[in-house]
Image: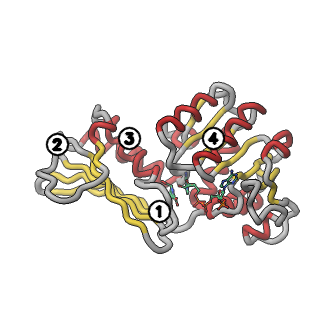
Amino acid sequence: MTTAIAITGACGRMGKMLVESVHTNKATSLAGALEHPGSNLIGNDAGEIAGVGRIGVPVLGDLSSIISRTEVIIDFSTPSATLANAQICADNGTPIVVGTTGFSDEEKQQLTELSSKIPMCIAANYSTGLNISLKLLELAAKAVDEDVDIEIVEAHHRHKVDAPSGTALAMGETIAKARNLDFKEFALFAREGITGARRKDTIGFSTVRGGDVVGDHTVMFMADGERLEVTHKASNRMAFAHGAVRAATWLVKKEPGVYDMQDVLGLS
Ligand SMILES: NC(=O)C1=CN([C@@H]2O[C@H](COP(=O)(O)OP(=O)(O)OC[C@H]3O[C@@H](n4cnc5c(N)ncnc54)[C@H](OP(=O)(O)O)[C@@H]3O)[C@@H](O)[C@H]2O)C=CC1
Ligand SMILES: O=C(O)C1=N[C@H](C(=O)O)C[C@H](O)C1
């Protein structure tokens, strides 16, 4: 038996990778491919759009029309689309894997409220390497000197619409938690002009956007006399897609609640 997965945002950069990953994985089958109802790609074959040839799955504009034959949804789209799709999943008891980033605090709250009805996996980054790096960051954040300076630098392609990346924020939150700091108080997202000397315990963020960079993240722990850097570089979106599909097959057996990729990988 294969796990029947539907992909929302199926014609996007990640959606195409997810269609390919689900289609080529022997343990999964593509139950549906969704775009927003106004998309001019509705009716096209999802496999042809993903570049894997005709697979007989048309791109549709209404998730409700295929949800009854779907065991789990994978959604990498936009915050408002993900929230609407998660509501449909909650109404139908269908688990959802969320890859979308850029949610406001209020949107995050609305999303997690729906998890009382369905299993939901939410992660800013589904790659295995990045999730291992979160464990390394936790270790480093606890072990380095109290007065170390911590900076996070991320780079992404020119089309990315949210900043800092969800992954950079997750890295900062992991570090703040390990050092018993309030992330909202100590995160510093911009510097310009006469900023004054660096404030102790700040976690600084720098954002680079350009070209076709898939996703680079570096965390620097800077002390007097030495610097530790933890870097992850994604060179192909398939690293995220395979991780999300793995999360989907894991999630279908779970109770309602919020999970993340650390849970899927047994790292939590
Ligand atoms: N967690 C992770 O591992 C990763 C997360 N991401 C995140 O995933 C998200 C998508 O990234 P990416 O693929 O690059 O972005 P794209 O813009 O390429 O893809 C988003 C897709 O969603 C579609 N869409 C918009 N509204 C709806 C809707 N209501 N229903 C269905 N589809 C809709 C868009 O259509 P249209 O273009 O016509 O509006 C588009 O095809 C981002 O938030 C990104 O940060 C990305 C990579 C990895
Ligand atoms: O938009 C992207 O491309 C990516 N988004 C995610 C994020 O915001 O962290 C993950 C990955 O870095 C690629």
Q: How far apart are marks 3 and 4 (CA)?
A: 24 Å
Residue picked out by circle 4: 83
Badge 3 element: helix
Residue 38 picture location, percent across and down? 75, 58
Left or right? Give the position of 169 relative to 99.
left
- Going by the numbered disc 2, the residue's amino acid type is Lys
How many numbered dots are placed on residues in this image?
Answer: 4
Crowding at mark 2 (Cα within 10 Å: few <14, some 14-19, many 20+)? few
Distance between the alpha carbons at the discs numbered 2 and 3: 18 Å
Going from N to C along the chain, the mark reached first, 1 or 3, is: 3
Pointer 2 with pointer 1, Cβ within 8 A: no
Q: Circle 2 sits in a helix, a strand or a loop, which is it?
A: loop
Tag in front: 3 or 4:
4
Callout 1 secondary element: strand
Comparing 94 with 103, the one in front is: 103
Q: What residue type is labelled 3?
A: Thr
Compared with 243, 117 (above or below) is: above
Q: Is mark 3 within 8 Å of ligand 2?
A: no
What amino acid type is highlighted by mark number 1?
Gly
Seen as rendered, the residue at the extreme front is 38
Q: Judge the density around disc 4: few (<14), some (14-19), many (≥20) Cα neighbours within 10 Å.
A: many
At 35% across and 45% down in the image, what residue appears?
A: 172
**Tag on residue 174?**
3
The residue singled out by tag 2 in the image is 200
